[in-house]
Image (cartoon, grey):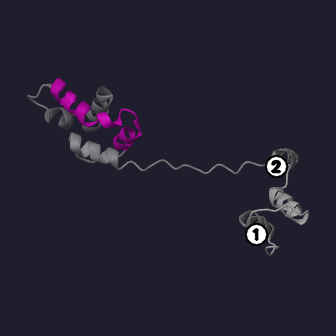
Amino acid sequence: MIDAIFAKLAVRYGATWLRQWDGVDMNLVKSDWGSELSGFAQNLEPLRYALRHLPERCPNVSQFRAFANNCPLPEFHRLPAPLANERVVAEQIAKQTELKQALAPRIDPKQWAKTLINRHKAGERLRPAQLRFACEALGMEVVA
């Protein structure tokens, strides 16, 4: 990656690029650039952007990284909403309705209260609390 960047910069800036590294071990320079640009290893597009937008003067690694960081974010276009097959949707709704009905309780949840009231009407003695709770559950006034 760094060799490709250096090749592009050498072509663009020629001798000016090479003169700025006179007396410096080029391996150390490349190592420094590699370290500074390592954050772009998973996404090279910002580096391509920086190479397409080079300034008139040779950049140092900090300037080059700043150019790369100015890379605009990619545009993502929203996908169209999926179209539903009306027949399939109707079938699924019917299946869910059948399932809901199949799982619904088959007994009256207030049957216990009705049973107590019927036992009371038949003459069985119930505790006052039993009678009161049964009447309240059925929305009736307490029968004596």
Mark 1: amino acid:
Glu
Q: Which one is earlier in the sequence, the residue at label 1 or at label 2?
A: 2
User: Looking at the picture, how far across and down is residue 129, in whole percent?
Assistant: 71, 65
Distance of label 1 from label 2 (alpha carbons): 24 Å
Q: Is the magenta stretch mostly helix, strand or loop?
A: helix
User: Looking at the picture, how far across and down is residue 77, in whole percent?
Assistant: 59, 50
Outermost residue, bottom side: 141
Locate residue 120 relative to residue 15 in the image: left or right.
Answer: right
User: Looking at the picture, how far across and down is residue 100, in whole percent?
Assistant: 81, 48
User: Looking at the picture, how far across and down is residue 51, in whole percent?
Assistant: 34, 40
Q: Which of 96 and 50 is in front in this view?
A: 96
The quarter of the picture where residue 126 lies is: bottom right
Q: Which residue does the image show at 22% across and 28% down from the upper left?
A: 30
Is residue 115 visible from the viewing direction of this image?
Answer: yes
Q: Which mark is residue 136?
A: 1
Locate residue 92 relative to residue 18 in the image: left or right.
Answer: right
Q: Of helix, strand and loop, which one carries label 2?
A: loop
Q: Which residue does the image show at 88% across and 47% down from the upper left?
A: 87
Q: Residues within 10 Å of mark 2 (few under 14, many from 20)?
A: few
User: In the rendered image of this protein, does residue 10 appear above or below residue 143?
Assistant: above
Q: Which residue does the image show at 18% across and 32% down from the upper left?
A: 18
Q: Which mark is residue 104?
A: 2
The quarter of the picture where residue 65 lies is: top left
Q: What stretch is highlighted in magenta?
A: 26-52
Mark 2: amino acid:
Ala
User: In the rendered image of this protein, does residue 51 appear above or below residue 127?
Assistant: above
> Is residue 46 part of the magenta span, yes or no?
yes
- Number of marks present in the image shown: 2
Give the quarter of the figure containing the C terminus: bottom right
Locate residue 59 relative to residue 106 in the image: left or right.
Answer: left
